[in-house]
Image (spheres, rainbow, N blue to C red):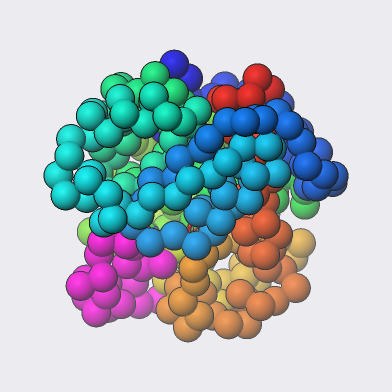
């Protein structure tokens, strides 16, 4: 069974096909029937606005019925094993979109499932977001290959997915993180082995220098809320503000997966600037995920 747990699960050629199809969906938002009469289960163990809605609307616009389960209201949330949940869902639905904590949980779900499982964010990865981000970059620059992306901030799930995206998309990635908040060494090694060109630094200005794309994320991810105060200290100086954007190319764009904290990881002036593409990026979640659903469950 074909799953989408990380960007390793699609080839560069498939990525191009998927992004082309996502562009088609963006250009023409008509109702389609590529997933006619199917059911897509969206199972959430963490909060979500964009991911939930984009999969719900996307499934609907492809002719499928989305069914969203909030884990706390399910037996999974009361301790029913993931494997039992996976087998049961396989009997009802045609795809499962699963947001959870440890990545091993989505892997377990996939291993026990006979329908496609899509990673809707784990502590380690957020691959669906990167599909939308790459669609947004392509819309801006017409390509991914050869571009320079700067990641400013936490070595988190988004940073890890950017590393694998660099391998699949052929752009280079400069990552500036404070000490103690580095990307995972194993994922870094994996991305480099897949061909990603990744430069690590402690200096946000060095990372942003000459970048085509500057991107960041919250300093405390979901599940790390009680570390907020200590992280605010550690990330002092890692804000993406106007001064940092001046180090990037003049035609550079700013991306953020959202939700954003203006005045923490990004200044309001950058978030709401002419260089910001965050709203197109958020909308592209819908188009890219429709293409992903078609690739996995609809025969793209
Ligand atoms: N970017 C993103 O995944 O947003 P949500 O947490 O709202 O789904
Ligand atoms: N790194 C963030 C991304 C949210 C979409 C988190 O995991 O909370």
Give the x, y percent position of residue 120. Answer: 44, 45
Give the x, y percent position of residue 205. Answer: 51, 66
- Does the magenta portion include 225? yes
Residue at 23%, 28% in the rendered image: 83
Which one is nearer the viewer's eye here, 79 or 195? 79
Write the start and end of the magenta stretch as one range.
218-237
Left or right of residue 246: residue 258: left
Residue that protrudes farthest toward the top in the picture? 1
Left or right of residue 113: residue 4: right
Residue at 32%, 62% in the rendered image: 222
Which one is nearer the viewer's eye here, 98 or 89? 89
Residue at 39%, 19% in the rendered image: 114
- Does the magenta portion include 28? no
Which one is nearer the viewer's eye here, 91 or 175? 91
* Quadrant in the picture for residue 63: top right
Asked if residue 213 can be seen in this view, the reply is: no
Q: Is residue 175 above or below residue 296?
A: below
């Amino acid at each position: 069974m074909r799953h989408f747990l990380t960007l390793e699960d699609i080839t560069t050629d498939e990525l191009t096909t998927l992004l082309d199809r996502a562009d088609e969906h963006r250009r023409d938002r008509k109702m389609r029937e590529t997933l006619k009469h199917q059911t897509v289960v969206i199972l959430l163990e963490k909060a979500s606005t964009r991911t939930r809605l984009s999969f719900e609307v996307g499934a609907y616009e492809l002719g499928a019925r989305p069914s969203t389960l909030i884990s706390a209201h399910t037996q999974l949330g009361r301790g029913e094993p993931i494997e039992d949940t996976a087998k049961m869902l396989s009997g009802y639905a045609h795809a499962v979109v699963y947001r959870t904590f440890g990545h091993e949980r989505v892997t377990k779900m996939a291993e026990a499932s006979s329908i496609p499982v899509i990673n809707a964010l784990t502590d380690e990865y957020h691959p669906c977001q990167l599909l939308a981000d790459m669609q947004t970059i392509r819309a801006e620059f017409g390509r991914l290959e050869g571009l320079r992306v700067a990641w400013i901030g936490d070595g988190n799930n988004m940073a890890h997915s950017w590393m694998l995206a660099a391998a699949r998309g052929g752009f280079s990635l400069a990552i500036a993180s404070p000490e103690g908040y580095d990307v995972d060494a194993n994922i870094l090694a994996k991305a480099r082995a897949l061909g990603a060109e990744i430069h690590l630094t402690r200096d946000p200005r060095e990372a942003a220098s000459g970048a085509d794309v500057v991107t960041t994320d919250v300093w405390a991810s979901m599940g790390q809320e009680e570390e907020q105060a200590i992280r605010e200290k550690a990330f002092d100086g890692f804000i993406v503000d106007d001064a940092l954007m001046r180090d990037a190319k003049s035609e550079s764009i700013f991306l953020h997966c959202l939700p954003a904290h203006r005045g923490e990881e990004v200044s309001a002036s950058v978030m709401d600037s002419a260089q910001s593409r965050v709203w197109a990026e958020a909308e592209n979640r819908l188009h890219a995920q429709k293409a992903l659903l078609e690739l996995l469950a609809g025969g793209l």
